[in-house]
Image (spheres, helix red, strand yellow):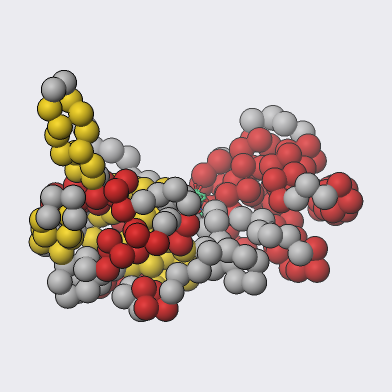
Amino acid sequence: MKSIIPYYHIVGKEIDIFEHSFKNKIPLLLKGPTGTGKSRFIEFMAHKMEMKLITVSCHEETSSTDLIGRFIIKGAETVWLDGPLTKAVKEGAMIYLDELAEARPDVIVAIHSLTDHRRELYIDKLGETIKAHTDFMLVASFNPGYQRGFKEIKPSTRQRFVAISFGYPDTKIETEILINETNVNASDAKKLVQIGTKIRNLTELGLAETVSTRLLIDAAKLIHSGLPKRLAVKAAVVEPLTDDLEVIQALADLCDLMI
Ligand code: ADP
C-alpha cells in the first residue's frame, strides 16, 4: 500500500535546493525556529524521492554511540547493533538529525567524514570504516536563537552544509496551510494568521520563541473541533508562549479583540 503524500506547501525554492544538494551529495542544513515546517518538508521530500527517512531528535544526551551503534548482550553473546546513522549510511537512506546543535560534541566529530568528499563513517568500536551508499543523504536542522543562549553550530561544521532558512510563511500561504491542515473555515484561519503576525511583531515582549505555524495550527484544530475561539487561542497560542501572568493577560486581551 502506498502511503499518503505528506501535505507540504512550497514556500520558496527549497525543493530545487534539496534536489541539487542530493544530486551533488552535499549535506543539507535547515535553519529556523521551531514549528516552521522543517520536519514536514523533509517528510515530504523523502516521500517525493521515494527514500527511506530515519529521523533522530537530538537532545543534550545524544551521543555518537546512539547514532553509530553499540554492542549489546544477547543470551551468552555480545552482538553489535547498528545505530540509525550506520543503518542510513549502509542502506542509502536519508537521515534527519533534528536539532543537531543540541547533541553532544562527539556527534559532530562522528559526522565530519560523512559530510565531506570522503562520505565515510568510522565505527571506532569495530575499528571499521564504511563508505556511504550512493543514495545516503544527511540532513540536519538547527534553531538559530542567537543571543538567547541557544546552542550554536561551529562555522567549521556549518560550512560543510548547504543551508536553507525557514521562517514564518507570508499570510496568504500560512492561511492556506491552516485551512489544509485543519479544515478550519477561511475567516477563522485568516484571523489566526493575523494574530500570529501581530504577536510576532511584538518583539518588546522578549519571548524566547514567538508564535509558530504549529501553534496556529493547534488553535485552528481546537476551533474546528468546537472549542470556543477565544479559549482555543488562549490555550493553544498564548499559554505555550510564556509563563509570565501579566504577559499572558495582555496577549489574551489582544487576541480577544482579534478573533
Ligand atoms: P519544525 O520541524 O520546523 O519544528 P514542523 O515541520 O513540525 O516544524 O511544522 C509544524 C507544523 O506546521 C507541521 O506539523 C505542519 O502542520 C505545519 N507546517 C508548517 N509549515 C508548513 C508548510 N510549509 N506546509 C505544510 N504544513 C506546514
Residue at image point 64% right, 30% down: 225
Residue at image point 62% right, 65% down: 149
Say which quarter of the image contains residue 111: bottom left
Q: Is residue 198 visible?
A: no
Q: Position of residue 165 (x, y in %)?
A: 47, 71
Q: Position of residue 234 (x, y in %)?
A: 77, 42
88 in relation to 161, above or below: above
Total label count?
0
Q: Position of residue 227 (x, y in %)?
A: 72, 31
111 in relation to 259, above or below: below
Residue at image point 78% right, 47% down: 243
**Horizontal relation, residue 32 to residue 92: left or right:** right
Say which quarter of the image contains residue 174: bottom right
Residue at image point 15% right, 32% down: 78
124 in relation to 165, above or below: above
* Residue, far front: 76
Q: Name the foreground residue: 112 vs 137.
A: 112
Q: Name the foreground residue: 191 vs 165.
A: 165
**Horizontal relation, residue 165 to residue 88: left or right:** right
